[in-house]
Amino acid sequence: MFFNYFAPARIMFGKGQLNHLYASSLPGRRALLVVSSGRSIRENGYLGRVEKQLDLAGVSYVVYDNVQPNPTQSNVMLGSAFANRNACDFVVALGGGSVMDAAKAIACMATNDGDLWDYVTGGSGKGKPFLNAPLPVVAITTTAGTGSEVNQWAVITREETNEKIGMGNDKVFPVIAVVDPELMLTVPPELTAYQGFDALFHATEGYISKSASPVSDLFALKAIALIGSSLARTVRNGLDEDARADVALANTLSGMLLSICRITSEHSMEHALSAFHPALPHGAGLLMLSRAYYSHFALSGVCDEKMIAMAKALGRQTDTAADFVDALVALQEDCGVADLRMSDYGIRKEALPRYVKNARETMGELFEMDPVPLSDADCLSIFERSWR
Ligand SMILES: [Zn+2]
């Protein structure tokens, strides 16, 4: 038994916490405020609320809103140049995983020379270490899914080569994470479900991972139980504040888990799909793969006890590993996301071998975390059984 525990983000969790941001020790005097290119962050009044907090704190800022879903290398490089042109000394991310991940990568590239892909490990990345500490990051999440506000990871896509790769280092943990479920009340049902399942799969992959530890297991099982008890309620009634708070907590616990253990190849396989098909939401891609993926490990018999514990966390009284898959599918049905189709996103069955190759080449490290090694044939079979 061994583990490393390092999770240094100060977390401000709970309804109304955003209103106290001005009084926390913000790490600079001039912020790059990173938001998405969509309209909702303005229309829902969230941008105005954060601007008010910065005004109250006496912090000046410039807004960078050139971040798309599945943020790209060029979103990051333009953002870091913009930060430097405006002499920003810290970064505030306001949005979901795409925005927070882009903001972290921008913070790194604002203080380091060259191109982002010089520092990415995996795929065509050159794997150089960052020489300089990034700008400090404050992350305010408006979704409950990625948990990016509390960990060191950023997932960025390089469009020319269809690579979607997670990068991170210990210096890029946000210094302050605001998780205010009030900011999540406007997330539509479908996205609530996709994001909630992303949080669930961080927990389930982390739990069966070879790098799991007694500490990460605490985060995983609690997150799975919270998603099991409250995600479907949240999808049915987005204004249910208690259910939203439960799902927000699951998101944060899963995000903390990501900082202390590595997840498994389900994420490598999904990144391959959304690298080629950026319109595919990350959580939706994971959902499409999940039934075949967990069935594979349930049948292999290598992690029966863990499967049973996860089924119990989802509320099943059982002593059979396969019941976890049944509980998972039942939860998907409850949330209205059991029948997602890859073909609706332009993914062709004949192209599946290319995703096997891409998953291994870009995010091969996560395959090493699987409880039993997945061969390329296993991987292809999971893609094939998931395809509709
Ligand atoms: Zn994820």
Image (tube, rainbow, N blue to C red):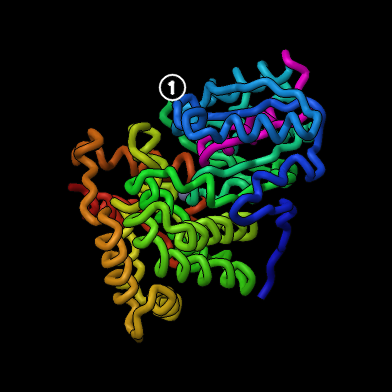
Magenta segment: 85-109
What residue occupies the far top of the structure in this picture?
85
Local crowd at mark 1 within 10 Å, few (<14), some, or many (≥20)?
A: few
Tell how many labels: 1
**Which one is nearer the viewer's eye here, 122 or 151?**
151
- x then y, percent, for residue 193: 36, 52
- x then y, percent, for residue 6: 73, 58
- Seen in the picture, residue 202 relative to 71 is either above or below; the reply is below
> Which residue does the image show at 28% across and 42% down from the upper left?
353
Q: Does the magenta stretch include residue 87?
A: yes
Q: Does the magenta stretch include residue 260?
A: no
- x then y, percent, for residue 201: 43, 58
Q: Give the quarter of the image for residue 167.
A: top right
Mark 1 lies on a secondary structure that is helix
> Which residue does the image show at 27% across and 64% down from the upper left?
329
- Residue 269 visible in the displayed image: no
The reply, left or right, for residue 115 in relation to residue 166 is right
- x then y, percent, for residue 321: 34, 78
The reply, left or right, for residue 332 in relation to residue 3 is left
